[in-house]
Amino acid sequence: MANSNKKFVTLMFVVAWIANLYPLASTANGDNYVRDACSVTRYPELCIHSLASFSNTAKASPSLWARAGVSVTLSEAKSVARYLVFLKRQRSMQSGRNIVALSDCVECFQNAIDELHKSLGVLRSLSSGTFNAQMEDLNTWLSAALTDTDTCLDGFDGQRGRQIRLLQSRVSKATYITSNALALANKLAATGLRSIAGP
């Protein structure tokens, strides 16, 4: 009986912790905000999962959703880049073809991270006087980041193994999140100046 009580208390603690971590998941308005924002993306379920925590702040603002999308993409790209560097140190990945492909992959993600930083800089300084030019820059940087993350996988075509599959999965997820960020940026560009909200 004591063990059952302990398990129940532990379960309730975990539920409360998750509720605090993702408070928006239980609010109808928050859920509607993120679902509406993500409806323009190619991978809406991934978008909803990765951006739900921004609902209370972004609400119905395309500019804030675009910024959230790029911020999450940047975090994901940095995480994958660290993972790729870790893989380069693994003996099983140090064959001729793998080490070259990994080096290329790391370079691709470093480029993508730079481009995402530039994208975030654009979104943090939106101005009515330069909005159209800023949207062109934003599209350029995000498109380049998408190309870089996608190009990373080219060197692993036809290769097999658990580590290769895991690498492909991690890189693909980053590519999908980048694609979603680009879609959110395109929505901002299409919505226009009235969508700019917040500092």
Image (cartoon, rainbow, N blue to C red):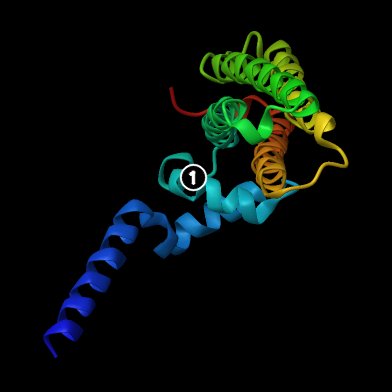
Q: Residue 176, position in %: x, y?
A: 70, 42
Residue 12, placed above or below residue 35 = below
Residue 134, placed above or below residue 175 = above
Q: How many marks?
A: 1
Residue at mark 1: 59
Q: Secondary structure at mark 1?
A: loop
Rate crowding at label 1 as few (under 14), some (14 to 19) or many (20 or more) other CA atoms within 10 Å.
some
Q: Front-most of 60 and 118?
A: 118
Q: Is residue 167 left or right of residue 72?
A: right
Q: Residue 9, position in %: x, y?
A: 18, 74
Residue 156, placed above or below residue 56 = above
- Any part of residue 22 in sight: yes
Given the current orientation, which residue lies at the most extreme left position? 2
Q: Quadrant of residue 11?
A: bottom left
Task: Please tell me which residue is depicted at 73% across the width and 29% down the height of the picture.
Answer: 149
Image quadrant containing the C terminus? top left
Task: Please tell me which residue is depicted at 60% across the width and 55% down the height of the picture.
Answer: 35
Q: Quadrant of residue 164?
A: top right
Image quadrant containing the N terminus? bottom left
Q: Could you tell me the amino acid type at mark 1?
A: Lys
